[in-house]
Amino acid sequence: MDAIDHRILRELRRDGRISNVALAERVSLSPSACLNCFYAANSIRLYRKANKHSVLARLKPMIRTLLTTLFQTLFSPTTWGEAFQLESRAIG
């Protein structure tokens, strides 16, 4: 985002219902250039949001598999039985 995008954002935060012509006057742009900046910033935001969700969608199955494997390893009777036998041998 450049300085113009920040000015547009600041004006939209002040008045979210401002018309494109009034917004263009406040940020010293032509109405068409102002609209292009708005659409470009909005498409970048939507791309980032979609990309974030796609990364999460790819990570969720891996995280689920990792947690399942970890749970099965930690709470498996074999693991606890082996640990108990090793501890018994070390003590006795």
Image (cartoon, rainbow, N blue to C red):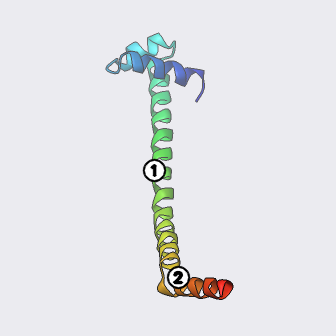
Q: Which circle, 1 or 2, is nearer the viewer?
A: 2
Disc 1, SS: helix
**Residue at point 48% right, 17% down?**
30
Q: x and y percent of residue 58 in the render?
A: 49, 64
- For mark 2, what is the residue? 80
Q: How many marks?
A: 2
Q: Does 29 sit above or below residue 54? A: above
Where is residue 72 shown, x and y percent of the image? 48, 78
Secondary element at image label 2: helix
Q: Amino acid at mark 1?
A: Ala
Nearest to the observer: residue 85 or residue 13: 85
Mark 2, Cα crowd under 10 Å, few <14 / some 14-19 / many 20+, is few
Quadrant holding the N terminus: top right
Query: What residue is disc 1 on?
Result: 50
Q: Nearer the viewer, residue 57 or 37?
A: 57
Crowding near the residue tagged with mark 1, few <14, some 14–19, many ≥20 C-alpha atoms within 10 Å? few
